[in-house]
Image: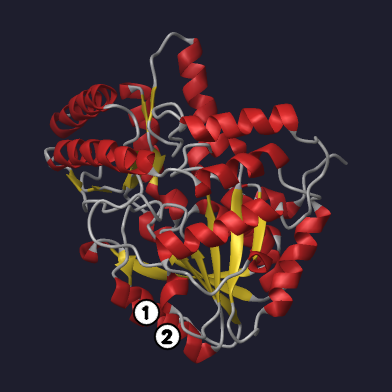
Amino acid sequence: MGKASERISRVKYAIRDLIVHAKRLEEKGRKIIYLNIGDPAPFFEVPSHVREAMVKAVMERSAGYAPSEGIPEFREAVCRKEREVNEVTSITPDDVIATAGVSEGIQLVIQALADPGDEVLLPDPTYPPYRSYAALNGVGIRTYRCLEDEGWTPDVDDLRSKMDENVKAVFLINPNNPCGSVYPERRVKEIVDVAGEYGVPIVSDEIYDQIVYEGRFRSAASLAGDVPVIGLNGLSKTYLVPGWRLGYVYFHDPEGVIQDVKEGVVKGARVRLSVNVPAQVAGAAALNGSKEHVKELVSALRERRDYTFKRLSEIHEFHCEEPRGAFYVFPRINLRKWRDDLEFVIEVLNDAGVLLVNGSGFGENGGWHFRMVFLPTVDILEEAFNRLEEFMKRKRSG
């Protein structure tokens, strides 16, 4: 009696699992530098027109429920943004469903795509909620590796080798969390082609689509032709409002082959009633309005990326591929004085007061790595790296 379900016991979320321990250290007077969560809000200001739209919506708009699929102006704004930014010209507002962030989109899509016993194909390393929502729905997981020596781009041969009739979808995260990679256009097209051969949809998480430092981001749907693509995106990162919990799912489906899946996502959306209405109103204003802040955001993050990569490259016990998008770096730990990468990040927290995320929390291929965000200002990053460098010097000589 009172025992939690077996399925919930399988859920882990490495990005937040160590926060309780960090808070205990703070209660004892330790100053902790948090480099674990991809939350830009503490370091960047939300554009004024977005904030004003939110205030106006709260003051003037009804506080009632919205349609489960989302308010019309938000869904129309999504189509306009995807067309102008990502060259996705195939979707209409009827193909868009508002979600409480990308996380809810992941949940709705997985439960609509697959039954218990079916399988989905995920990248390794991968963002943890994909594994968690699959496990909660009894869906099996297969993984394809991403190649560190090729900037963490997917190994298409490995992906192809994992395909069979049990796989219901191929998932992409591009630009990538946790690795910061931006997939070359040819690699995205190769993955689309494999999915097309096996008659399964691509599910493409593109939440960092406008945070790119080198190269060009290409949306899977813009390259897919008649291969169906389920896009996941939102306003948390580029528009700096993660706490508003506003995202969306869209369906590129020229042949109508996943219409039933779309209806399944809508059914799931009806069960949770509706997404925050003022946030949708402000989200439409954000997507339709000026995007000047994006240039400033990317410029500031590029400076922080460059500083982070420089400092990591100077610590010889680490090897790091330079991130080309998002705001994460995923270094390899070459000094093996710990049992595993989890023990490493725990000791860094206890000794240096810097909270990182163990790479194994993102999958087997992430073992002996760690994820670090470079959202804070350079002066905060400098203090974090000074602490980390001193820590590694002690371990090197110890």
Secondary-structure class at tag 1? helix
Residue 193: mark in rendering: 2
Establish if 348 lies above or below 67.
above
Rendered residue at 56%/88% (across/down): 199
Label 2, label 1: how far apart the Cα atoms are: 6 Å
- Residue at 37% x, 55% y: name it: 366
Answer whether labels 2 and 1 touch (C-beta < 8 Å).
yes
For label 1, the residue is: 189
Assign the C terminus to one quadrant of the image. top left
Q: For the residue marked with disc 1, what is the amino acid? A: Lys
Q: Within 10 angstroms of label 2, few (less than 14), some, or many (20 or more) residues?
A: some
Q: Residue at x 42, y 36 (%)?
A: 36
Residue sitting at x 47%, y 10% = 28
Q: Which corner quadrant of the image does residue 137 belong to?
A: bottom right
- For the N terminus, the image quarter is top right
Give the percent coordinates (x, y) of residue 277: 72, 41
* Circle 2: residue type: Asp
Does residue 227 lie above or below 128 as drawn? below
Helix or strand or loop: what does disc 2 sit on?
helix
